[in-house]
Image (spheres, rainbow, N blue to C red):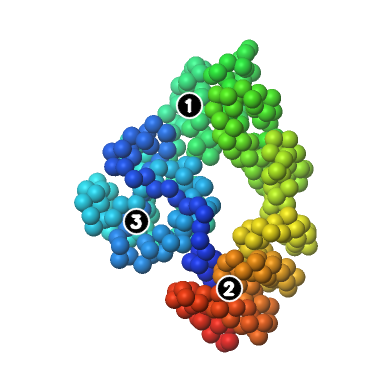
């Protein structure tokens, strides 16, 4: 089953046209350092060569993914540096590169937070970025002063921000600061509330929504909504961690009050995660079917749902049946050859080899004129016949 899912993901990445992906910085290394320091972000560096196979695969199949782009564009200054050209040779004087690709995470002062070698798939690559952010822990720069009793705004704000970036708890410190303030409507305190909002099931989240208009005026609606969504997701994580479904209900209600158009998908997605963790396949598949009805004509997300269900419950006949149904619906749109590939492989897994080959032949017909896709379709047909 793992090989099946790997094939699905690779085919999806290799054959689909991606709408997003990483927006790589085009300036100099010195400009990247300056930008990283100003924005308080790490620099992600893809140290590559033009002849490196894994480098090419990451460029085509990982860096182009929507989820990867969303995460890396938000949290990093991303750069691609060819190690065989002058900028790459200068880079290697300070940062050794002995294999390709080498993936560096470097702060604005030029200090390495994390480095690793070799290609990654999209999920691994996002997890790598999350780990690098946690390792770039600056909270110690403020902890000693805080323990000594210093409570000026800049110290507490930067301490909370550093804790948040490192993935450490910050609510107690934030709440203690909020309790000490008589006027929460000052510009400083409104910005503090935004930074301190990490969980939907908290007083600070309620303060954020109470003062939302004023905070939006100081920042942007997109920034505030991003924080709301992240806080709701964190509360859903807690629901799964502590096996307390009511937290998902609470997070959904709070998201619905602020971004009603996203609430239904959020609730069902989190319900699936909860039921998967609790090993409740019937409840999981019920939520998946409800989500599929919402997607309906959203063929890209319907296809992703098929892969998700197959990955989670690939040995469950009912799960495979539902996943194939979603893939079939996406494929019927005739908009992406990858949807046919997914449906064919799921049919094969279900023991329906003849049906799988028929679907793969549709993919080959759709690929006509594209040599790479025709070859992939032919290889798929051959594998299904074995």
324 displayed left or right of 88: right
**Residue at point 75% right, 58% down?**
293
Residue 368: x, y in percent? 50, 77
Marking on residue 158: 1
Residue 310: x, y in percent? 65, 67
Element at label 3: strand
Residue 225 or 274: which is nearer the viewer?
225
Residue 372: x, y in percent? 45, 74
- Figure quadrant of the N terminus: bottom right
- Above or below 117: residue 226: above
Q: How many labels does the image show?
A: 3
Q: Residues within 10 Å of mark 1 (few under 14, many from 20)?
A: some
**Residue at point 76% right, 43% down?**
249
Marking on residue 102: 3
Q: Mark 2 points at which residue?
A: 341
- Figure quadrant of the C terminus: bottom right
**Residue at point 36% right, 35% down?**
35
Element at label 1: helix
CA gap between label 3 and label 2 equals: 31 Å
Marking on residue 364: none
Element at label 2: helix
**Mark 3 and 2 residues: CB-CB less than 8 Å, in contact?**
no
The answer to whether any part of residue 205 appears in the image is yes
Residue 81: x, y in percent? 31, 52
Q: Residues within 10 Å of mark 3 (few under 14, many from 20)?
A: some
Image quadrant where residue 348 sits: bottom right
**Residue at point 37% right, 45% down?**
25
- Above or below 219: residue 78: below
**Mark 3 and 1 residues: CB-CB less than 8 Å, in contact?**
no
CA gap between label 3 and label 1 equals: 31 Å
135 displayed left or right of 1: left
Q: Of label 3 and label 2, which has the lower sequence position?
A: 3
């Amino acid at each position: 089953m793992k090989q099946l899912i790997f094939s699905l993901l690779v085919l999806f990445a290799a054959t689909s046209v991606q709408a997003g992906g990483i927006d790589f910085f085009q300036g100099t290394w010195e400009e990247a350092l300056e930008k990283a320091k100003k924005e308080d972000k790490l620099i992600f560096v893809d140290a590559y060569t033009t002849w490196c196979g894994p480098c090419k695969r990451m460029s085509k199949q990982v860096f182009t993914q929507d989820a990867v782009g969303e995460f890396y564009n938000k949290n990093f200054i991303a750069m691609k540096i060819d190690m065989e050209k002058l900028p790459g040779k200068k880079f290697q004087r300070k940062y050794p590169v002995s294999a390709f690709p080498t993936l560096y995470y470097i702060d604005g002062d030029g200090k390495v937070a994390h480095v690793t070698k070799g290609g990654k798939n999209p999920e691994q690559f996002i997890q790598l970025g999350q780990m690098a952010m946690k390792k770039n822990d600056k909270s110690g720069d403020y902890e000693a002063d805080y323990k000594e009793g210093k409570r000026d705004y800049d110290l507490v704000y930067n301490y909370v921000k550093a804790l948040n970036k490192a993935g450490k708890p910050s609510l107690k410190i934030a709440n203690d600061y909020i309790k000490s303030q008589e006027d929460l409507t000052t510009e400083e305190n409104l910005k503090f509330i935004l930074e301190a909002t990490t969980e939907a099931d908290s007083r600070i989240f309620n303060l954020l929504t109470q003062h939302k208009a004023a905070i939006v005026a100081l920042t942007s609606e997109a920034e505030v909504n991003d924080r709301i969504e992240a806080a709701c997701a964190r509360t859903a994580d807690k629901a799964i961690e502590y096996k307390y479904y009511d937290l998902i209900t609470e997070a959904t209600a709070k998201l619905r009050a602020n971004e009603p158009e996203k609430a239904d998908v959020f609730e069902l997605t989190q319900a699936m995660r909860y039921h998967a963790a609790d090993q409740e396949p019937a409840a999981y598949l019920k939520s998946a079917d409800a989500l599929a009805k919402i997607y309906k004509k959203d063929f890209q997300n319907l296809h992703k749902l098929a892969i998700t269900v197959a990955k989670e419950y690939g040995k469950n006949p009912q799960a495979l049946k539902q996943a194939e149904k979603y893939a079939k619906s996406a494929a019927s749109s005739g908009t992406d050859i990858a949807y046919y590939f997914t449906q064919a492989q799921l049919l094969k897994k279900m023991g329906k080899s003849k049906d799988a080959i028929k679907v793969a032949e549709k993919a080959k017909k759709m690929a006509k004129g594209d040599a790479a896709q025709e070859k992939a379709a032919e290889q798929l047909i051959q594998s299904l016949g074995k």
